[in-house]
Image: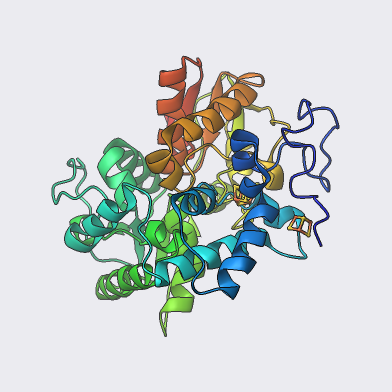
Amino acid sequence: MQCASCYYKGPIVPHNWRELPPFEWSPPNKKCPSYEYFKFRAFSPVGRGNLASIVFDDPNFPVTDSLIKIVYTCTGCGTCSEICKAHDPWTVIWALKEYLTSRGIKLPNPLPKLFANIENCGNIFGTEKPPPVNRNIPKKGRDVLFTGCFMRFTQPNLIETIIYVLRKAGLNLAWLGDEELCCGFLPGQQGDIDKMEKQAQQNVKRLREAGASRIIVSCAHCYKALRDYYPKLIDTFPFEVVHISEIYARLIEKGKITFNKKLQKKVTYHDPCFLGRHSKLYNEPRAVIESIPAVKLEEMERRKQWAYCCGSGAKAISLCYPDFSFSISKERLLEAKEKANTVVTSCSSCVLQMRRAAAKLGVEIYVQDISEIVAEGLE
Ligand code: SF4
Ligand code: SF4
């Protein structure tokens, strides 16, 4: 249709994204992070859609470095598919990545190394020794925590915080610990569905052996993988998958989590792309934040379905295109900083991305995971 809704008023028109006030039903002026940064239509949703139709039509179409860059600088944020129900550009781009993988293209670095790490060590870091988690926790039980390898290796203290909060609320929590493997979201999102399926099979087998019936997930990427992709890849998937913010919201409502501390602070909330837009979980994290005494939630203008990406791009953008990644983070952090000195989010990737970016870019803002602000309100 080429209507241009997915990129119009991008960088070719000098503007500020606040020129028009965003409404609940209307997208903000700045939409596609890669089009904003690279400033060529090829890097817009429709540009990639056009490219997909050419590549799908011609099996001999040359896969050049430029083509790879155009396709793999899509952050997967999904804003375009929120705008365009006619073409669902993000799904088309994902299909294009899957097709290119089937043609055996060389992925941008360091993705091949990370995929090999998942295969050899069960995590993206390529080592079998993650930092210790100082909590005794059973490996078998009905409610099983799934942390994901990213949190396991970069934020062991966040795992301790989650265990502390859920135990305090009376939940008998189990965790596979070293038996838990990468969820496979990273290769899956970059088009290698077979690798995601392999991870799904191994994780599901281990979760079954652990006696799980409900899986509690904190990372937005693991949550999307387990909730929506695993059931499509595995014949029988007998688990309920819940995000940690859903659990907190339920426990607060039942009176099992009661806050005994007033937190006199103003915070803003960043919707992780794969928790918000891709999973439609907007209300629970907000309900949790607003239930903490004296916390004031100030919303950013780009929120919920129009929230801007944090720059992580399901980790692939931060690892493959760090300059591009930091430029997105900077814009998001400055937007958050206008509203509050603390930005809360619900994904270990977003937390680390925004923390690292804030330190590197010198933006003075405190980045907090939802579990951390809950724990802070408890004691
Ligand atoms: S992808 Fe959708 S929104 Fe973008 S130009 Fe095409 S029809 Fe319009
Ligand atoms: S998913 Fe995000 S980055 Fe990718 S084309 Fe759509 S709007 Fe742009």
Rendering coords of residue 124 (x, y %): 27, 51
Q: Nearer the viewer, residue 280 or 10?
A: 10
Q: Is residue 344 above or below residue 64?
A: above
| Relative horizontal placement of residue 287, taking residue 111 as reference (left or right) | right
Rendering coords of residue 224 (x, y %): 49, 60
Rendering coords of residue 34 (x, y %): 59, 41
| Relative horizontal placement of residue 258, taking residue 305 as reference (left or right) | left
Scheme of image coloration:
rainbow
Number of labelled discs?
A: 0
Quarter occupied by residue 221 = bottom left
Say which residue appears at 77% left-offset and 65% top-offset: 86
Q: Taking the image as four quarters, which one is ligand 1 found in?
A: bottom right
Q: Is residue 64 above or below residue 326?
A: below
Q: Nearer the viewer, residue 324 or 239?
A: 324
Say which residue appears at 74% left-offset and 37% top-offset: 10
Rendering coords of residue 353 (x, y %): 43, 34
Say which residue appears at 46% left-offset and 60% top-offset: 63
